[in-house]
Amino acid sequence: MKDIFLADAHLLDPADANYQRLLTFLNSQCSGVRTLYLLGDIFEFWVGYKSVVFSPYVPLLDALYRLKSAGTDIVYIEGNHDFNLGPYFREILDCTILPDGGTVEIDELKVYLGHGDLVNAQDRRYRALRRFLRSRFMRYLMAIAPPDLTWGIARWAGRRSKESRTGRPRTKVPEALLRAHAVPLFAAGHQAVITGHYHSPMIDQTDQGTLVALGDWITQFSYAVYQDGKFSLKFF
Protein backbone atom coordinates (compact mmCIF):
# COMPACT_ATOMS: atom_id res chain seq x y z
CA MET A 1 0.00 0.00 0.00
CA LYS A 2 1.08 3.55 -0.66
CA ASP A 3 0.02 7.09 0.13
CA ILE A 4 -0.14 9.82 -2.53
CA PHE A 5 0.24 13.57 -2.06
CA LEU A 6 -0.60 16.14 -4.73
CA ALA A 7 -1.50 19.82 -4.97
CA ASP A 8 -2.11 22.77 -7.26
CA ALA A 9 -3.98 21.41 -10.24
CA HIS A 10 -6.11 24.58 -10.48
CA LEU A 11 -8.72 22.66 -12.44
CA LEU A 12 -11.30 24.66 -14.35
CA ASP A 13 -12.65 22.99 -17.48
CA PRO A 14 -12.96 19.20 -17.98
CA ALA A 15 -11.67 19.67 -21.54
CA ASP A 16 -8.36 21.12 -20.31
CA ALA A 17 -5.33 18.89 -20.75
CA ASN A 18 -4.28 18.99 -17.10
CA TYR A 19 -7.81 18.11 -15.99
CA GLN A 20 -7.91 15.09 -18.30
CA ARG A 21 -4.43 14.05 -17.20
CA LEU A 22 -5.40 14.16 -13.54
CA LEU A 23 -8.50 12.06 -14.22
CA THR A 24 -6.34 9.51 -16.01
CA PHE A 25 -3.94 9.43 -13.08
CA LEU A 26 -6.64 9.07 -10.42
CA ASN A 27 -8.44 6.36 -12.39
CA SER A 28 -5.15 4.44 -12.60
CA GLN A 29 -4.87 4.48 -8.80
CA CYS A 30 -8.11 2.71 -7.91
CA SER A 31 -6.29 -0.01 -6.03
CA GLY A 32 -3.34 0.00 -3.70
CA VAL A 33 -3.69 3.58 -2.42
CA ARG A 34 -4.23 3.78 1.32
CA THR A 35 -4.69 7.56 1.56
CA LEU A 36 -4.87 10.34 -1.01
CA TYR A 37 -3.69 13.64 0.46
CA LEU A 38 -4.86 16.69 -1.50
CA LEU A 39 -2.87 19.73 -0.39
CA GLY A 40 -5.02 22.49 -1.77
CA ASP A 41 -5.75 24.41 -4.97
CA ILE A 42 -6.93 21.27 -6.70
CA PHE A 43 -9.70 23.53 -8.01
CA GLU A 44 -9.22 26.94 -9.56
CA PHE A 45 -12.24 27.90 -7.50
CA TRP A 46 -14.44 26.02 -5.08
CA VAL A 47 -17.01 26.92 -2.47
CA GLY A 48 -19.21 24.28 -0.90
CA TYR A 49 -22.94 24.80 -1.29
CA LYS A 50 -25.43 22.73 0.69
CA SER A 51 -27.22 21.05 -2.21
CA VAL A 52 -25.27 21.74 -5.42
CA VAL A 53 -21.77 21.39 -6.85
CA PHE A 54 -20.29 23.22 -9.84
CA SER A 55 -20.96 21.06 -12.90
CA PRO A 56 -17.44 21.39 -14.42
CA TYR A 57 -16.11 19.55 -11.36
CA VAL A 58 -18.42 16.55 -11.54
CA PRO A 59 -15.85 14.38 -13.42
CA LEU A 60 -13.26 14.98 -10.70
CA LEU A 61 -15.75 14.40 -7.90
CA ASP A 62 -16.75 11.12 -9.56
CA ALA A 63 -13.10 10.05 -9.75
CA LEU A 64 -12.62 10.83 -6.07
CA TYR A 65 -15.79 8.94 -5.21
CA ARG A 66 -14.52 5.86 -7.07
CA LEU A 67 -11.27 6.02 -5.11
CA LYS A 68 -13.18 6.33 -1.86
CA SER A 69 -15.41 3.40 -2.82
CA ALA A 70 -12.31 1.33 -3.57
CA GLY A 71 -11.09 1.87 -0.01
CA THR A 72 -8.85 4.94 -0.30
CA ASP A 73 -9.14 7.49 2.48
CA ILE A 74 -9.05 11.14 1.40
CA VAL A 75 -7.49 13.97 3.39
CA TYR A 76 -7.97 17.51 2.07
CA ILE A 77 -5.86 20.47 3.16
CA GLU A 78 -7.66 23.60 2.04
CA GLY A 79 -5.78 25.98 -0.26
CA ASN A 80 -6.19 29.60 -1.17
CA HIS A 81 -8.48 28.72 -4.10
CA ASP A 82 -10.53 25.97 -2.45
CA PHE A 83 -11.83 26.38 1.07
CA ASN A 84 -15.13 26.05 2.91
CA LEU A 85 -15.36 22.70 1.14
CA GLY A 86 -18.87 21.98 2.32
CA PRO A 87 -21.18 18.97 2.58
CA TYR A 88 -20.06 17.02 -0.49
CA PHE A 89 -16.54 16.54 0.85
CA ARG A 90 -17.64 16.00 4.44
CA GLU A 91 -20.63 13.75 3.88
CA ILE A 92 -20.32 12.07 0.47
CA LEU A 93 -16.55 11.66 0.25
CA ASP A 94 -16.16 11.44 4.04
CA CYS A 95 -12.97 13.49 3.82
CA THR A 96 -10.79 14.50 6.69
CA ILE A 97 -10.57 18.27 6.13
CA LEU A 98 -7.70 20.35 7.55
CA PRO A 99 -8.51 24.03 6.82
CA ASP A 100 -5.09 25.31 7.92
CA GLY A 101 -3.04 22.16 7.54
CA GLY A 102 -1.89 20.06 10.45
CA THR A 103 -0.26 16.88 11.66
CA VAL A 104 -1.10 13.37 10.53
CA GLU A 105 0.43 10.04 11.50
CA ILE A 106 1.57 7.68 8.76
CA ASP A 107 3.00 4.36 9.92
CA GLU A 108 3.86 6.00 13.26
CA LEU A 109 5.64 8.85 11.47
CA LYS A 110 4.61 12.35 12.46
CA VAL A 111 4.01 14.29 9.22
CA TYR A 112 3.08 17.96 8.90
CA LEU A 113 0.93 18.87 5.89
CA GLY A 114 0.17 22.42 4.75
CA HIS A 115 -0.92 24.07 1.54
CA GLY A 116 2.04 26.43 1.83
CA ASP A 117 0.32 29.80 1.67
CA LEU A 118 1.09 30.33 5.38
CA VAL A 119 4.80 29.55 5.11
CA ASN A 120 5.80 33.21 4.83
CA ALA A 121 4.89 34.74 8.18
CA GLN A 122 5.96 38.18 6.95
CA ASP A 123 3.31 38.32 4.21
CA ARG A 124 0.80 40.15 6.42
CA ARG A 125 -1.18 41.54 3.50
CA TYR A 126 -1.98 38.08 2.19
CA ARG A 127 -2.76 36.78 5.68
CA ALA A 128 -5.26 39.60 6.22
CA LEU A 129 -6.92 38.84 2.87
CA ARG A 130 -7.01 35.14 3.76
CA ARG A 131 -8.75 35.83 7.06
CA PHE A 132 -11.31 38.04 5.31
CA LEU A 133 -12.11 35.50 2.59
CA ARG A 134 -12.63 32.80 5.23
CA SER A 135 -14.63 34.99 7.58
CA ARG A 136 -18.20 34.30 8.65
CA PHE A 137 -19.30 37.32 6.64
CA MET A 138 -17.86 35.93 3.40
CA ARG A 139 -19.24 32.47 4.12
CA TYR A 140 -22.65 34.04 4.54
CA LEU A 141 -22.36 35.97 1.25
CA MET A 142 -21.29 32.85 -0.62
CA ALA A 143 -24.11 30.83 0.94
CA ILE A 144 -26.82 33.24 -0.27
CA ALA A 145 -25.30 34.08 -3.66
CA PRO A 146 -26.69 32.07 -6.61
CA PRO A 147 -24.08 29.46 -7.67
CA ASP A 148 -24.06 30.71 -11.27
CA LEU A 149 -23.26 34.23 -10.09
CA THR A 150 -20.47 32.97 -7.82
CA TRP A 151 -19.04 30.87 -10.66
CA GLY A 152 -19.17 33.79 -13.08
CA ILE A 153 -17.34 36.09 -10.68
CA ALA A 154 -14.72 33.40 -10.04
CA ARG A 155 -14.14 32.87 -13.77
CA TRP A 156 -13.72 36.62 -14.28
CA ALA A 157 -11.29 36.91 -11.37
CA GLY A 158 -9.36 33.89 -12.64
CA ARG A 159 -8.96 35.41 -16.11
CA ARG A 160 -7.75 38.68 -14.61
CA SER A 161 -5.24 36.86 -12.43
CA LYS A 162 -3.98 34.80 -15.37
CA GLU A 163 -3.59 37.91 -17.53
CA SER A 164 -1.60 39.64 -14.80
CA ARG A 165 0.82 36.70 -14.64
CA THR A 166 1.31 36.36 -18.39
CA GLY A 167 4.92 36.88 -19.36
CA ARG A 168 6.22 36.76 -15.81
CA PRO A 169 8.94 34.21 -15.05
CA ARG A 170 7.80 31.37 -12.81
CA THR A 171 8.81 31.95 -9.20
CA LYS A 172 11.29 29.37 -8.01
CA VAL A 173 10.43 27.38 -4.93
CA PRO A 174 11.75 29.40 -1.94
CA GLU A 175 14.00 26.71 -0.52
CA ALA A 176 15.43 28.85 2.30
CA LEU A 177 11.94 29.91 3.38
CA LEU A 178 10.64 26.35 3.35
CA ARG A 179 13.64 25.07 5.29
CA ALA A 180 13.15 27.80 7.90
CA HIS A 181 9.48 26.83 8.10
CA ALA A 182 10.40 23.18 8.61
CA VAL A 183 13.02 23.68 11.35
CA PRO A 184 10.59 24.14 14.29
CA LEU A 185 8.35 21.39 12.93
CA PHE A 186 11.25 18.95 12.86
CA ALA A 187 12.22 20.11 16.36
CA ALA A 188 8.66 19.35 17.49
CA GLY A 189 9.08 15.75 16.39
CA HIS A 190 7.83 15.71 12.80
CA GLN A 191 9.74 13.38 10.52
CA ALA A 192 8.39 14.98 7.33
CA VAL A 193 6.97 18.33 6.18
CA ILE A 194 5.02 18.42 2.92
CA THR A 195 3.66 21.53 1.22
CA GLY A 196 2.12 22.72 -2.03
CA HIS A 197 1.49 26.26 -3.30
CA TYR A 198 4.87 26.96 -4.92
CA HIS A 199 4.32 25.03 -8.19
CA SER A 200 7.90 23.76 -8.30
CA PRO A 201 8.82 20.29 -7.02
CA MET A 202 11.57 19.75 -4.46
CA ILE A 203 12.57 17.06 -2.02
CA ASP A 204 15.17 17.65 0.67
CA GLN A 205 16.14 14.70 2.85
CA THR A 206 18.27 15.60 5.86
CA ASP A 207 19.15 14.15 9.24
CA GLN A 208 16.29 16.21 10.73
CA GLY A 209 13.63 14.91 8.36
CA THR A 210 12.18 15.03 4.86
CA LEU A 211 10.96 18.29 3.30
CA VAL A 212 8.80 18.04 0.18
CA ALA A 213 7.39 20.76 -2.09
CA LEU A 214 4.89 19.01 -4.35
CA GLY A 215 5.10 21.11 -7.51
CA ASP A 216 1.86 21.26 -9.50
CA TRP A 217 -0.49 19.44 -11.85
CA ILE A 218 -0.42 22.15 -14.52
CA THR A 219 2.97 21.77 -16.21
CA GLN A 220 4.97 19.66 -13.74
CA PHE A 221 2.48 16.81 -13.14
CA SER A 222 4.41 16.01 -10.00
CA TYR A 223 3.33 14.30 -6.82
CA ALA A 224 4.83 12.58 -3.80
CA VAL A 225 4.51 8.97 -2.71
CA TYR A 226 5.10 7.38 0.66
CA GLN A 227 5.81 3.68 0.32
CA ASP A 228 7.98 1.16 2.14
CA GLY A 229 8.97 3.77 4.72
CA LYS A 230 10.24 6.34 2.22
CA PHE A 231 9.00 9.55 0.58
CA SER A 232 9.73 10.15 -3.09
CA LEU A 233 8.80 12.64 -5.81
CA LYS A 234 7.32 11.29 -9.00
CA PHE A 235 6.04 12.67 -12.31
CA PHE A 236 3.13 11.43 -14.42
Image (cartoon, rainbow, N blue to C red):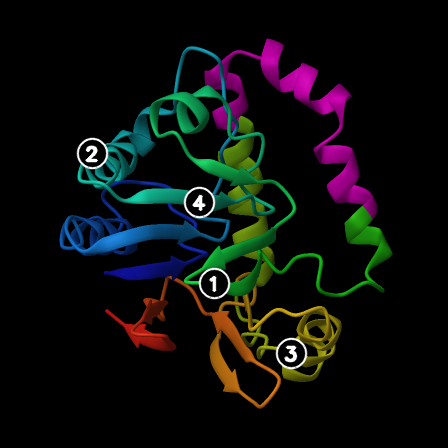
State whether residue 207 is above or below residue 78: below
Q: Left or right of 188: which side holds 66?
A: left
Few, some or many C-alpha atoms within 10 Å of disc 2 (few <14, some 14-19, many ≥20)?
few
Q: CA distance from mark 4 to mark 2?
A: 15 Å
Which of disc 2 and disc 4 is earlier in sequence?
A: 2
Q: For numbered disc 1, what is the local secondary structure?
A: loop
Query: Which of labels 1 and 4 is toward the front?
Result: 1
Few, some or many C-alpha atoms within 10 Å of disc 1 (few <14, some 14-19, many ≥20)?
few
Is the C-beta separation of discs 1 and 4 under 8 Å? Answer: no
**Residue type of the residue flagged with mark 2:** Ser
Which of disc 4 and disc 1 is earlier in sequence?
A: 4
**Residue type of the residue flagged with mark 3:** Pro
Which of disc 2 and disc 3 is earlier in sequence?
A: 2
- Residue 102: x and y in percent read 62, 52
Q: CA distance from mark 3 to mark 2?
A: 38 Å
Q: Nearer the viewer, residue 126 or 223?
A: 223
- Residue 93: x and y in percent read 35, 30
Q: Where does label 1 land, which residue?
A: 108
